[in-house]
Image (cartoon, helix red, strand yellow):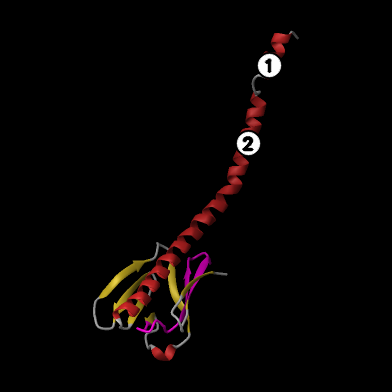
Amino acid sequence: MTPGESAKRASGFSLLELIAVLVIMGLAAGLAAPRIQDFLEEARIRTGARKLATLLRYARNQALSTKQVVTVATDESGQRWWIKYSELPAAERVVKLPPGIKGKIVERYFSALSDAKASILFSPQGNSTGQLIEIYDDHGRKFQLAVDPVIGNITLLRGS
């Protein structure tokens, strides 16, 4: 082998080396794809939970500023949530959760304050009927929103 031949041979990759790298990259991509899908699905649920938390915080602020009871209610499917004022019959600020994501009230702290099973009341003093809301999908992934009954604070919790 002459010095020119060894420099020419060392300057590139062989076909076998390129195929080995492509196989390794393909395996890595195949292993990462399910994790990416799970991450995206969890992000959809988190987005729905944050949208609902924003609606609840807005309702509490409206109750404080307008000095009237403000209700956040949901339909039977748990996909649509809206605000209703005690003195206005029409709903305002409707939030629709992403497709395949639903929400439900799973625990009520002061059920005697409200007859409606699918609603949360915020009083002009800032407190609420206090609920635990679960945002979930069909695969068992979930987040929870805790509505504090004393101060009306909304906390986003990671589901189990």
Placement of 148 over or under 49, stated as above or below: below
Amino acid residing under circle 1: Arg
Q: Residue at x 54, y 51 (%)?
A: 36
Q: Is the residue marked by circle 1 packed among few (<14), some (14-19), or many (20+) residues within 10 Å?
A: few
Judged from the image, the secondary structure of the residue bearing numbered disc 2 is: helix
Query: Which circle's residue, 2 or 1, is located before the other in the chain?
Result: 1
Q: Residue furthest right?
A: 1
Placement of 73 over or under 4, stated as above or below: below
Q: Is residue 68 left or right of residue 44?
A: left
Disc 2 from disc 1: Cα separation = 23 Å
Quadrant of the rendered image containing residue 115: bottom left
Part of the protein shown in magenta = 122-146
Q: Position of residue 124 (x, y in %)?
A: 35, 83
Q: Do the residues labelled 2 and 1 touch (CB within 8 Å)?
A: no
Q: Based on the picture, tell me whether residue 88 belongs to the magenta stretch.
A: no
Q: Is the residue marked by circle 2 packed among few (<14), some (14-19), or many (20+) residues within 10 Å?
A: few
Q: Position of residue 143 (x, y in %)?
A: 51, 68
- Give the residue at mark 1: 9
Q: In this view, does 136 lie to the left or right of 79?
A: right
Near-viewer residue (151 or 55): 151
Quadrant of the rendering where the N terminus is positioned: top right
Residue 75 shows in this picture = no
Judged from the image, the secondary structure of the residue bearing numbered disc 1 is: helix
Quadrant of the rendered image containing residue 54: bottom left
Q: Which residue is drawn at 47% across and 80% down?
A: 148
Q: Position of residue 110 (x, y in %)?
A: 45, 88
Residue 66 shows in this picture = yes
Q: Position of residue 24 (x, y in %)?
A: 64, 38
Near-viewer residue (14 or 143): 143
Q: Which mark is residue 23?
A: 2
Q: Is residue 9 left or right of residue 64?
A: right
